[in-house]
Image (tube, rainbow, N blue to C red):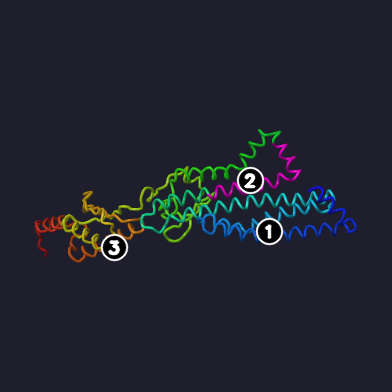
Amino acid sequence: MEHFIREFRNDTAWLPDWFVSIGVLVVAFLIGLAIQRFGFRFLTRLVENRDLFWRSLVSRTRRPMRLAILTWTLSFGATVAPLTGNQASVIRHILLLCFIVVVGWMAKIALHVWTVVYLRRFKLDAEDNLLARAHVTQSRIMERILSFMIVAITIAATLMTFPAVQQYGVSLLASAGVAGIVLGLALQPVLKNIFAGIQLAITQPIRIDDALIVEGEWGNVEEITSTYVVMKLWDWRRMILPLSYFIEQPFQNWTREGAALIGTVMIYLDYSVPVDVIRKKAEEIAAASKLWDRRVVAVQVTDFRENVMEIRILASASNAPKTFDLRCEMREKLIDFIQREYPSALPRVRAEGAANSAVVGEAAQPRTLQS
């Protein structure tokens, strides 16, 4: 190699150095493009019978592969070209930065392709999607955390190629105690959410599409990022919460172990209503409803009050939205039935006894003749 470089420079000594350098770099660039084109075709044919991961990886890494090959050929061209020491140093530094960016870029693409291919086997729109939600949540959280780490390491590696940053890093190491405390305080919110994300991915108190009650609001988990959670509320509003909230604060998860829920309907009726009739009607309404999952339906008198009795009706459905709709359907059809068949059973103030006593007492009093 050294003999070839020496012979090349002797043969081009009659040309200006700047002209030779530009020519060599242009030729190296064109050679790099040609190598990338043929190399990409070769890899595409090589993986055409392999699984989806390798085919997607080759397809998605076309641009970073081109940058990597151009970095290699231009590095060779910079070695051959008659550059000055300062020029060669600048070009090699730029190529080193390109190489670091290529490595981080390809690592991020490989992570994304693996996550997408892995999650293809799970369907969130399935009726029983508990397992799918668990894998999707864990994979997406870990993907975002690892992507953040790849970007951070790439930026740190590029900065450390500059002498000024290296000297700053050495000075930080010299005062590691103070620097560590200051850095820890400054990055406390970021690190807190990163570690909360790792804990959420492992323990999974919440998952994608879980039905939650948070801060008095009901909604579904729409997105989990590396720092916050997006909840789509029942009226289409979005509530944004930090990841650390779900580690430190209490909340209700209606779909933690399964999507099915038991809905409760409370109705207050007069003591004269026949409970058996209400029970049969509730069972009839549930059996005719498409929302009922055929698992739980019950009617019980749960309390006696001064003027009414409290009747609790239980009915189950396959998920939280269906449970809510089933409760509303039970209320509407029950009140319609009672209004038609037993209107006297609706709650009313019992004042008949007191009124009759007042009339009898008035009649018993002697009447005085008026002059």
The alpha-carbon separation of the residues under discs 3 and 2 comes to 54 Å
Q: Measured from the top left, where is residue 272 in percent x and y? A: 15, 57
The alpha-carbon separation of the residues under discs 1 and 2 comes to 29 Å
Query: What amino acid is found at the position of numbered circle 1 in the picture?
Result: Ile
Residue at x 62% of width, y 53% of height? 105
Query: What amino acid is found at the position of numbered circle 3 in the picture?
Result: Lys
Instruction: First in sequence, mark 1 or 2: give its number.
Output: 1
Residue at x 30% of width, y 52% of height? 262
Instruction: First in sequence, mark 1 or 3: give its number.
Output: 1
| Disc nearest the viewer among 1 and 2 | 1
Kind of element beneath mark 2: helix
Q: Main secondary structure of the magenta part?
A: helix
Res 182 quadrant in image:
top right
**Cβ atoms under marks 1 and 2 closer than 8 Å:** no
309 displayed left or right of 215: left
Q: Residue furthest bottom?
A: 340
Please give the label number shown on residue 153.
Answer: 2
**Span highlighted in magenta in the image:** 143-172
Q: Out of 267 and 40, give the one closest to the viewer.
A: 40
Q: According to the image, label 3 marks what residue?
A: 290
Q: Measured from the top left, where is residue 4 in percent x and y? A: 81, 51
The alpha-carbon separation of the residues under discs 1 and 3 comes to 63 Å
Please give the label number shown on residue 35.
Answer: 1
User: How dense is the environment of label 3, judged by Cα within 10 Å: few (below 14), some, or many (20 and up)?
Assistant: few
**Cβ atoms under marks 1 and 3 closer than 8 Å:** no
Q: Measured from the top left, where is residue 199 in percent x and y? A: 49, 42
Q: Measured from the top left, where is residue 311 in percent x and y? A: 23, 53
The quadrant the C terminus occupies is bottom left
Instruction: First in sequence, mark 3 or 2: give its number.
Output: 2
Query: What amino acid is found at the position of numbered circle 2 in the picture?
Result: Ile
User: How dense is the environment of label 2, judged by Cα within 10 Å: few (below 14), some, or many (20 and up)?
Assistant: some
